[in-house]
Image (cartoon, helix red, strand yellow):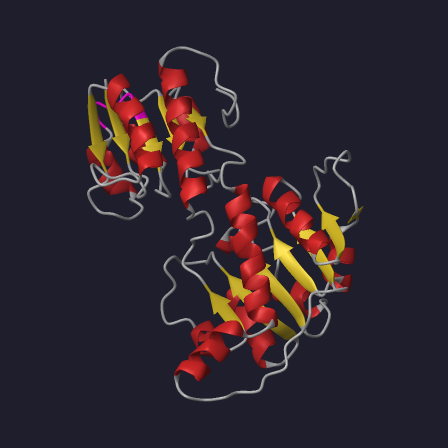
């Protein structure tokens, strides 16, 4: 049995002990493992070369299009290394009888940590002050405190809930919007509408999936309705936010700051956001902790082995 592994955390050798444990399990199960030869997410033409003959596929942030899947005549399961699957053509996979799985919750604590790191970095201008201090300057800068502020969480899934718990530790008022809200999880959280979050929060965090309905949901008009000086954080998916509009509103002083880990184009090239001191950017690294990568690896391998062994899997995306 042949398996393709394109998640860039997995390597043929020199993995961390936790990742190596999952890889050893996969090696015991599969006769042949093909690894990502490029060290980055793959495009359809590259996948079309690698997928033939594979029964299983542990996918990173690859573009798994219908054209790529046309070459996957023996493929039975795509096991996403991560929770998002907007780059996988689910309909095309299901047409071919391919099961698609993901790893919900595996990286939620890591993403919540980076979300708060970005909030604090933007609120206290940490990167700019670090840069000035190392350059021999002794800059005096006025930031804002989180204590007593209102945080608005758009998307109260596993990550949104973890962010809410951290915000409560800062004695923040927590507003949340989610069209599929779990009413049982509302301790200390004010469940409200999208517009209320947009208009009342001092800090707004995006934790929504990227779908046809949520693409571009944070438009220029939406950002104009935010409080003057509001901080906006996106550790979910780049397509949720209109970056050009955000840039103009930052320059105009309407937005107080922006923290991004995900982008409309990845990696971003020559973005005007690079020039702004009230913007903090990280390279889609929210899930890059030892604990999260180990969790995602274990779940992704479990899902693949479970499906290929003919057993029921709890983390199937959609239905075949």
Give the total number of marks visible in the rendering: 0
- Any magenta on residue 54? yes
Q: Which residue is at 42% across, 53% downward?
A: 285
Asked whether 72 or 127 is in front, the reply is: 127
Residue 102 drawn at (x, y percent): 46, 31
Dividing the picture into quadrants, the one containing residue 34 is top left
Dividing the picture into quadrants, the one containing residue 65 is top left
Q: Horizontally, is 308 left or right of 106 in the view?
A: left
Which region shows up in magenta?
52-56
Q: Is residue 168 visible?
A: yes
Q: Horizontally, is 241 left or right of 82 in the view?
A: right
Q: Is residue 256 above or below residue 105?
A: below
Instruction: Name the magenta segment's main secondary structure.
Output: loop
Q: Horizontally, is 256 left or right of 168 in the view?
A: left
Q: Which residue is at 24% across, 35% downward?
A: 48
Q: Is residue 6 above or below residue 27?
A: below
Dividing the picture into quadrants, the one containing residue 87 is top left
Residue 44 drawn at (x, y percent): 29, 41
Q: Is residue 18 above or below residue 290?
A: above
Q: Which residue is at 60% across, 39% downward?
A: 158
Q: Is residue 241 visible?
A: no
- Any magenta on residue 88? no
Q: Which residue is at 50% across, 61% downward?
A: 260
Residue 187 drawn at (x, y percent): 78, 42
Q: Horizontally, is 238 left or right of 206 in the view?
A: left
Q: Which quadrant is the N terminus positioned in?
A: top left
Residue 281 drawn at (x, y percent): 46, 65
Q: Is residue 51 above or below residue 165?
A: above
């Amino acid at each position: 049995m042949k398996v393709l592994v394109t998640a860039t955390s997995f390597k043929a050798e020199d993995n961390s002990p936790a990742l190596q444990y999952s890889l050893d399990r996969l090696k015991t199960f599969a006769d042949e493992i093909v690894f990502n030869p490029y060290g980055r997410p793959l495009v359809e033409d590259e996948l079309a070369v690698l997928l033939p003959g594979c029964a299983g596929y542990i996918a990173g942030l690859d573009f798994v299009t219908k054209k790529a899947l046309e070459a996957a005549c023996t493929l039975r399961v795509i096991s996403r290394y991560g929770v998002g699957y907007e780059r996988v053509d689910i309909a095309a996979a299901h047409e071919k009888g391919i099961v698609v799985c993901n790893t919900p919750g595996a990286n939620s604590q890591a993403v919540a940590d980076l979300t708060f790191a970005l909030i604090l970095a933007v609120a206290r201008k940490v990167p700019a002050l670090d840069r000035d201090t190392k350059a021999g300057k002794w800059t005096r800068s006025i930031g804002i405190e989180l204590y007593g502020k209102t945080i608005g969480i758009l998307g109260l899934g596993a990550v949104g809930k973890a962010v809410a718990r951290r915000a409560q530790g800062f004695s923040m008022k927590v507003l949340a919007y989610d069209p599929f809200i779990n009413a049982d999880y509302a301790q200390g959280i004010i469940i409200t509408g999208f517009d209320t979050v947009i208009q009342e929060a001092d800090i707004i965090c995006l934790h929504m999936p990227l779908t046809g309905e949520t693409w571009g949901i944070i438009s220029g008009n939406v950002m104009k309705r935010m409080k003057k000086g509001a901080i906006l954080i996106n550790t979910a998916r780049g397509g949720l936010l209109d970056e050009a509009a955000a840039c103009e509103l930052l320059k105009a002083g309407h937005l107080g700051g922006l923290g991004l880990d995900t982008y409309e184009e990845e990696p971003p090239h020559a973005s005007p956001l690079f020039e702004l001191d009230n913007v903090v950017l990280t390279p889609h690294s929210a899930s890059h902790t030892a604990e999260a990568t180990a969790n995602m690896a274990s779940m992704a391998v479990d899902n693949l082995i479970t499906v290929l062994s003919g057993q029921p899997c709890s983390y199937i995306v959609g239905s075949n």
